[in-house]
Image (cartoon, rainbow, N blue to C red):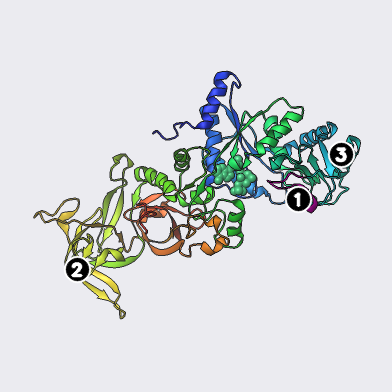
Amino acid sequence: MAADAPRSNFIRQIIDKDLASGKHSSVHTRFPPEPNGFLHIGHAKSIVLNFGIAKDYQGQCNLRFDDTNPLKEKVDYVNSIQEDVKWLGYTWEGQPRYSSNYFDQLHAYAVELIEKGLAYVDFSSQDEMREMRGTLKEPGKNSPYRDTSVEENLQHFADMTAGKYEEGKAALRAKIDMSSPFMVLRDPVIYRVRFAHHHQTGDKWCVYPMYDFTHCISDALEGITHSLCTLEFQDNRRLYDWVLDNISIDCHPQQIEFSRLNLQYTVMSKRKLNLLVEEGKVSGWDDPRMPTIAGMRRRGYTPSSVREFCHRIGVTKMDNQVEMSMLEACIRDELNHGAPRAMAVIDPVRLVIENYPEGEVEQLQAPNHPNDESMGSREVPFAREIFIEREDFRESANKKYKRLVLDKEVRLRNAYVIKAERVEKDADGNITTIFCSYDPETLGKDPADGRKVKGVIHWVAAEHAKPAEFRLYDRLFQVPNPAAEEDFFSTLNPDSLVVKQGYVEPSMAAAKAEKPFQFERIGYFCADSNDSSAEHLVFNQTVGLRDTWNDEA
Ligand code: ATP
Ligand code: MG
């Protein structure tokens, strides 16, 4: 399937029907993040769904910050969210919106409900309210404040708004049904007192609307046609509809729920991700091991690979856990075709070619992609001393080992056939240098006498290579569903980051951050956007060459 080709799902089918029946003439969606953390791959699913629908139906999608909780929200998050949505390839309609833009209207609608006898100020304590709420099996009890007169309620709400009540002492509740089988309809709180500074409205308000009251009205004010959210809001839809049915507003968007993305071996709740950051378990929200958009981006994931992942997982109402290998396959497939190749040695051992002239340097041509000539080629210096991977040499080995063995030949990628003659070791028996000879007639061709050389290994020229740090990543947690653990910190993988010091070919000094290369035979890597510099090159592993998730028993 072509990248970004629309793939149908039950929500698109509803939209098709609404357009065909004339219920709507165009589609207007929104993406409503709460600015209390960075966006993660779960949000990407919602972004691709909402913005993707707007794009494919020539409609519109708003970006709206759901900022009704001033205590947990920060402007830094507002900025990172905008950056991440843009990076994913989407633009929102007009300016970003804020639920707080509507605080005046929301307040007026609350007053309208009071005037209609559909809301009241409750002075019960939070414990008392909890007690009166009942349970799934038992109906709730009416609050003693439920039948206060409209006039009194108007005065109480005005007093609440004027700051006359402490936090927790008074709350505005919708008057719906204390025996409803849907707990959300048991007179939900719609406004509460919070003496908090808000990042958008400053100190203007000391009462803040609750999410359920805010969301439906914000959707309606923006003319949203289809309000897409995750399954845990299924019951809240009753309240969404109740509010819009009982205030004077013309627009009534349709809320449709779909299942959240859960990804194995990581956590997706912003609260938990925040804990990882706060407790220093990762270097920040953009740590490449985090399932955040910023982390994946720093690691070398591309916007198209993330979008492709969202297309592949699809949109349904079924809760499930997606394997990490599905995400990795998307970036691997893309990079296999599109990433330029280069050579790097991450665990180096010195190799000296004794019959190669001392002081001589050849500039060899290396293709940037083995199957795509249009990607061109580059010069790679070759000299008498090179580095190869320590694991690519053995003093003795059976036939299955297709690398360098003492007395045997191997081909150096993009260069000559060499033969290992002898080794030098330190006092502990570790090999310090491998001495070889080379066959000068084998550059770009097989040996003339017809002897077969099967193995190919990569290398870099010792004097020309640039030292580099390599950061190799593994799953952040040791169990598939860390969120289910009581102490999810205890399941962190202590080896989720392994740092190696090695070398890259000189052309890599110019590598741009976030642009992945395939280091041949090692994996895909990109320069780190925070820590890599000309003096100290740092490369992050994007993904391995093969799927290793399912190899380990
Ligand atoms: P979290 O539990 O991580 O804090 P949230 O739902 O509170 O998530 P919001 O910022 O409110 O986070 O989410 C913005 C939008 O993204 C919502 O419409 C929400 O349903 C959607 N969303 C959040 N997490 C996921 C997920 N894992 N899969 C799909 N959609 C998600
Ligand atoms: Mg939320």
Task: Report the disc number at residue 406.
Answer: 2
Furthest toward the left, the residue is 449
Pointer 2: residues within 10 angstroms few (<14), some, or many (20+)?
Answer: some
Task: Report the disc number at residue 130.
Answer: 1
Residue 207 coordinates in the image, percent (x, y): 80, 44
Residue 318 coordinates in the image, percent (x, y): 51, 41
Mark positioned earlier in the residue sequence (1 or 3): 1
- Mark nearest the camera among 3 and 2 is 3
Question: For the N terminus, which image quadrant?
Answer: top left
- Secondary structure under tag 2 reads loop
Q: Amino acid at mark 3?
A: Asp
- Secondary structure under tag 1 reads helix
* Left or right placement of residue 189 versus residue 330 in this view: right
Please indicate, yes or no, whether residue 552 appears anywhere in the rendered image.
yes
Figure quarter occupied by ligand 1? top right
Pointer 1: residues within 10 angstroms few (<14), some, or many (20+)?
Answer: few
Separation (CA) of disc 2 from disc 1: 77 Å
Vertical side of 84 occupied by 427: above or below? below
- In the image, the segment drawn in magenta is 127-140
Separation (CA) of disc 3 from disc 2: 93 Å
Whether disc 1's CB lies below 8 Å from ligand 2 is answered no
- Mark nearest the camera among 2 and 1 is 1
Q: Amino acid at mark 1?
A: Arg
Vertical side of 494 occupied by 29: above or below? above
335 is within the stretch colored magenta: no
Q: Residue at x 46, y 57 (%)?
A: 475
Residue denoted by label 3: 147
Mark positioned earlier in the residue sequence (3 or 2): 3
Pointer 3: residues within 10 angstroms few (<14), some, or many (20+)?
Answer: some
Residue 227 coordinates in the image, percent (x, y): 62, 33
